[in-house]
Image (cartoon, grey):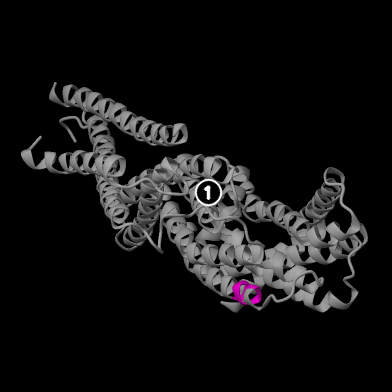
Amino acid sequence: MKGRDYILPALVFVSMLLALYLVGFYAPIEREQGVVQKIFYFHVPSAWVAFLAFFVVFVFSFRYLVSRDKRWDNRAAAAAEVGVMFCTLVIITGPIWAKPVWGIWWTWDARLTLTLVLWLIYVSYVLLRHYVADAEKRATLSAVLGIIGFIDVPLVYFAIRWWRTQHPQPVIAGGGGSGMDPRMATAFWVSLAAFTVLFVYLYRVRAKQHDLEDEIEQAHQLADELPATGKGD
Amino acid sequence: MTWMIAAYMVIWIAIFVFVFNMDRRQKALAAELEQLKSKLGS
Amino acid sequence: MLRTIATILWKDLRIELRTRDALSASFVFCVLVLVIFNFTLDLGSEEARRLGSGFLWVAFAFGGILSLNRTFALEKADGCSKSLMLAPVDRGAIYLGKFLANVVFMLVTQVLILPLFVVFFNVPAESAVPLLLLIFLLGSIGFSSVGTLFSAMAANTRMRELMLPLLLLPVSIPVLLAAVETTQYALGVNENASDWFKLLIVYDIVFVVASYLGFEFVMEE
């Protein structure tokens, strides 16, 4: 590994450590919710990162359909996989936060519901890839789904928001907007940066793995052909 | 407080599992690469 | 192009008229869903009126998935899909033909279910029938637009019957939600549903166009 290759992992390590320190020791304890509120510092950045991931899937799906270069498909797949992981984190930490604060595990509030729907769409993306055998077909179908899924997102957002204003529920929010202590803001932004860097790192590793899988596949095919090409050919 | 710890554990475990699986796949790919090299080298 | 659409539409409709497979399956399934809801949730008449729209559209969604599943299953089964793809016709036209056939199937089921719904749930729907039909149409268009596309996609996978609902249900949440809210409005449960009507129309336009364009890629060989 070249020296260059260590930059990103080092960045992940440092930013995460810094974020943890700020969240644990620098950010004040919220008055009403207590220590539990600190889940916010990882819950919300995970959501933002998941959303970023799905946007990336959208862009790379387009690029694949335009160029038919398999590497774009690999990148889209990598982004989706990492995105689903972060999305899962949001859905699990949400209830863990809600139970001690509001006494209930789940409310169908706008943000958490939107995240859940997003999770469903991109899990179906991952499953679709799993069930299509042919590589090119898989790439094409996933790309179409990646685009359709993302187009759906604003519609889902408005649908859920209007649905929730008609039938209001308690909101798993908190920490954002009015009256946030500047120390909390710092911790939040650092945490967001740390999670974004982590996403980039995980995404790149996964994307390179997909590329490597393709190369190995090609090499296998070449190797299989070798004995067959005799001298007379 | 326990809830906080639970949440952080979940995050830590999830990321660890993800990275662990990636590492496993990396090793499998590396092994396949070795296999190929010997196939082609000989 | 129009002729292709008409040919495919007519072909699917005629197959259905002869066998009535999809329609009867979808109709019976919808009835079952409504009946089971009534059993499992023992609702008083007031609650039934309030919640009925939701159950109705759940029934329509699952019934719709049944008929959507068959859209391309037939083709794949007899090897027709290869000939369909070899034919020098606009892929988009194939999509539109299939899509319109699905809309018709869904609408027919819905029209047949409506009287049963009124009876089971004691809903005062008489005055609202024209509006309800419009809502059924808009909802079916939205649902079938992505449904037809995803049906084609799912046909390419190993688990066709499982993949279609998995793909379709999350993406169709806005149109299902809008359909339920507008139906509630039509039945006098909601006050104002103009936003929901707008959502229905926007969803229909966006996804008919998107699916039409996307179908090109799904159908290639």
- Please name the residue that numbered disc 1 is placed on: A120
Tell me what residue is drawn at x 12 percent, y 39 percent.
A6
Amino acid at pointer 1:
Leu
Between A219 and C32, the one lying in front of the other is C32
Residue A36 in the figure: left or right of residue A23:
right
Between C213 and C54, the residue placed more toward the observer is C54
Q: Would you place residue A227 above or below residue A233 in this image?
A: above
Q: Any magenta on residue A210?
A: no
Q: With C9 as the anchor, is A157 left or right in this view?
A: left
Percent position (x, y) of residue C68?
66, 56
Residue B41 image offset from top left, x and y in percent = 13, 24
As helix, strand or loop, the secondary structure at mark 1 comes to helix
| Residue C88 in the image, given as x and y percentages of width and height | 50, 67
Q: Residues within 10 Å of mark 1 (few under 14, many from 20)?
A: some
Can see residue A211? no
In the rendered view, would you say C44 is above or below A90?
Answer: below
For residue C138, which quarter of the picture?
Answer: bottom right
Q: Is A11 on the left-hand or right-hand side of C14?
A: left
Q: What residue sits 53% from the left and 50% below the top?
A: A116
Q: Is residue B28 above or below residue A126?
A: above
**Quarter that holds the C terminus of chain A:** top left
Helix, strand or loop: magenta stretch: helix
Q: Give residue C56's quadrant in the image.
A: bottom right
Residue shown at 47% from the left, 65% from the top: A151
Q: What chain letter is assigned to the residue under label 1?
A: A
Q: Give the magenta range.
A: C196-201
**In which quadrant will I find the N terminus of chain A?**
top left
Q: Nearer the viewer, residue A175 or A16?
A: A175
Q: In the picture provided, is A110 more to the left or to the right than A60? A: right
Q: Residue drawn 60% across and 78% down?
A: C2
